[in-house]
Amino acid sequence: MTFKEVKDFEYITIPEAKEIMEKIAEERKKSAELLFETRRALKHLRTFSKLKPEEAKKLVKELESMDAIGRREMAIKLVDIMPRTPDEIRTIFAKERFTLTPEQIQEILEVIDKYR
């Protein structure tokens, strides 16, 4: 048995993953029927994708540049979930070693609301 090795790893948003899976599905449809796993993954991505890939990338960049967020993975998580309330943002940041101020939470919500 051979195992595949991960050569590179990068976090991406759900809309970006959907775009990639759509292309893969298109190619695979030409040669054979889509596997169950591929169909399920695509269905999930279509259901939970809330933005266009270009908008998601712009929002990630904008969130990433904020002092309150800083890390790309957190910005991507925010884009994937698109929280609407301060409590949702607090939940996303619950495991972090810092607490966001009400002002920082409001600033994050305002930035996300521009992309709804």
Image (spheres, helix red, strand yellow):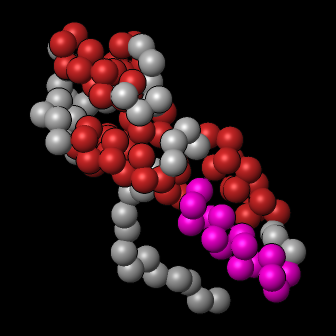
Q: Is residue 116 magenta?
A: no
Q: Nearer the viewer, residue 59 or 76?
A: 59
Q: Nearer the viewer, residue 91 or 34?
A: 34
Does the image show residue 11?
A: yes
Instruction: Pinpoint residue 81: horizontal percent, then vertical percent.
Output: 48, 33
Magenta stretch mostly in which secondary structure? helix
Residue 45 versus residue 34 in the image, above or below? above
Does the image show residue 94?
A: no
Is residue 37 rendered to the left or right of residue 48? right
Q: Residue at x 61, y 40 (%)?
A: 48
Q: Residue at x 17, y 30 (%)?
A: 68
Name the quarter where the N terminus is drawn.
bottom right
Instruction: Pinpoint residue 108: horizontal percent, then vertical percent.
Output: 28, 25
Instruction: Pinpoint residue 59: horizontal percent, then vertical percent.
Output: 34, 42
Instruction: Pinpoint residue 51: horizontal percent, then vertical percent.
Output: 51, 42
Q: Which residues are magenta?
A: 18-32
Q: Residue at x 68, y 41 (%)?
A: 47
Residue 103 versus residue 74 in the image, above or below? above
Using the rendered view, name the quadrant where residue 97 is placed.
top left
Q: Residue furthest right?
A: 33
Q: Residue furthest left?
A: 67
